């Protein structure tokens, strides 16, 4: 029978909740925001049920009520929600969702979600940084953070712990000069030369180029199309290869070789770039060998993408257009690829020097100063009828004052 203190609790809780028995197990009934909640105490002892009811009523009164569903949610439950989310949204690589889960589950074990606190997350970060790269740890914590977001959306957890920030300073800066690429191409197998040249000109991702089919190539219009949903950022893309003579010749030659091989083999070859009619898979070994023989070891295939972006910058293509060509969704990502090399900086300084050489210099107090200024004034009067180069040569800036007209401030 219930003790006196438990009877008092039941009397105080009248109207707020009650305890009743189903078979040998005691159950609770209480109200949360006007909704009836029934919860099993999972015990055959009345005292256990009374203590649980007291706890629930206290949580409700203090606004800290989580409920039995939240308290029973495990990290494995959240992990399954992450995998289901990848499948439901038809992500391109659902297998990638499972990669960080193994490390998370190994460290946290069969933990309840509410036990994954900020201090434990920090401990996980510290341990993983001993054996994994910072970018890998960032991806794993991002997966854990996503798991909690999905859990909050489903009502499985009430709050998400704070996640520490990891600064990554491993941005690559490699790119190819034309002579370097020519040497690498000489040492690549024949079926890879066209693919690598295509990547160098277009700046497309390797997976996009390897999966390119003739259905996406319009030889008459001279364009290559990527349909929306088939790219990394899910946006469609068009590259007018006919406007680039070398690329146009490459694609048409590839079409001729493919047609000849189709007649010989008696089958349709859907891929633009292939190895004897078969899809090109990984060519990392062939790439590393070619780079080593070309005396540029350590170069990455992804350096071709950075090179293409740098070439677009050199050509003066507007960033909005360049981003559409190479498939960059945000300008912040594009800027990471817009690499400036020492040669570019040297050219810029040479242009400034050339402009500087055309502008005459004088010192304050020089007897010729007034004469030069007078000539400058006369030049400004007749500037509308003079060539721009002559205006630059005749305009002399006063101390601390920029030229009034005619001077290209950038020198580019």
Image (cartoon, rainbow, N blue to C red):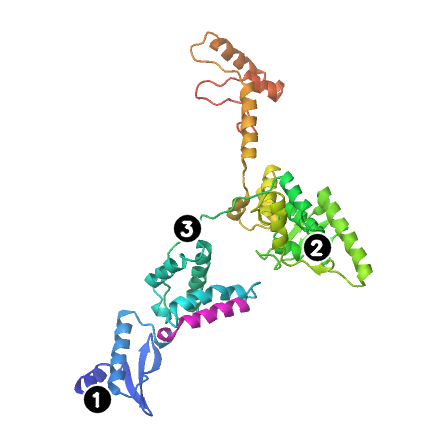
- Where does label 2 land, which residue? 273
Mark 2: secondary structure: loop
For the C terminus, which image quadrant? top right
State the residue in front, 254 or 233: 254
Q: Is residue 222 above or below residue 53?
A: above
- Where does label 3 land, which residue? 167
Indicate which disc residue 2 carries: 1
Q: Is residue 35 above or below residue 223?
A: below
Magenta stretch contains residue 204:
no
On screen, residue 312 versus residue 46, left or right, reads right
Q: Bounds of the magenta span? A: 70-88
Identify the residue at image location x=25%, y=87%: 46
Identify the residue at image location x=44%, y=54%: 134
Q: Is residue 236 visible?
A: no
Q: x, y percentage for residue 368?
A: 48, 8
- Mark 3 vs 2, N-terminal side: 3
Crowding near pointer 1: few (<14 within 10 Å), some, many (20+)? few
């Amino acid at each position: 029978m219930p003790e006196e203190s438990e009877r008092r609790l039941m009397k105080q809780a009248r109207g707020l909740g009650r305890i009743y028995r189903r078979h040998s197990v005691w159950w609770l009934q209480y109200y949360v925001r006007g909704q009836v909640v029934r919860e099993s105490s999972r015990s055959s002892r009345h005292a256990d049920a009374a203590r649980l009811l007291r706890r629930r009523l206290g949580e409700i009164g203090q606004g800290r009520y989580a409920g039995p569903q939240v308290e029973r949610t495990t990290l494995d439950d959240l992990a399954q929600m992450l995998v289901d989310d990848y499948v439901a949204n038809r992500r391109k690589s659902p297998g990638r969702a499972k990669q960080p889960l193994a490390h998370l589950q190994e460290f946290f074990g069969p933990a309840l979600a509410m036990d994954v606190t900020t201090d434990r997350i920090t401990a996980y970060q510290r341990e993983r940084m001993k054996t994994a790269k910072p970018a890998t740890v960032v991806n794993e914590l991002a997966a854990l953070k996503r798991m909690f977001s999905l859990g909050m959306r489903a009502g499985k957890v009430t709050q998400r712990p704070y996640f520490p920030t990891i600064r990554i300073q491993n941005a690559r800066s490699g790119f190819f000069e034309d002579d370097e690429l020519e040497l690498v191409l000489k040492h690549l197998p024949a079926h890879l030369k066209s693919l690598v040249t295509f990547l160098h000109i277009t700046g497309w991702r390797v997976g996009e180029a390897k999966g390119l089919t003739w259905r996406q190539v319009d030889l008459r219009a001279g364009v290559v199309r990527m349909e929306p949903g088939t790219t990394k950022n899910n946006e469609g893309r068009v590259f007018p290869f006919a406007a680039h003579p070398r690329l146009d010749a490459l694609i048409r030659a590839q079409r001729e070789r493919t047609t000849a091989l189709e007649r010989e083999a008696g089958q349709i070859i859907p891929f633009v770039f292939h190895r004897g009619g078969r899809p090109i898979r990984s060519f990392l070994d062939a790439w590393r060998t070619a780079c080593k023989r070309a005396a540029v070891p350590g170069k990455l295939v992804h350096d071709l993408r950075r090179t293409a972006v740098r070439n677009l910058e050199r050509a003066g293509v507007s960033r909005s257009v360049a981003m559409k060509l190479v498939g960059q969704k945000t300008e912040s990502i594009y800027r990471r690829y817009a690499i400036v090399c020492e040669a570019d900086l040297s050219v810029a300084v040479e242009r400034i020097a050339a402009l500087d050489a055309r502008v005459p210099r004088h010192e304050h107090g020089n007897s010729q100063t007034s004469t030069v200024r007078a000539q400058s004034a006369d030049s400004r009067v007749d500037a509308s009828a003079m060539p721009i180069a002559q205006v630059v040569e005749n305009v002399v800036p006063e101390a601390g004052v920029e030229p009034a007209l005619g001077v290209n401030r950038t020198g580019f």
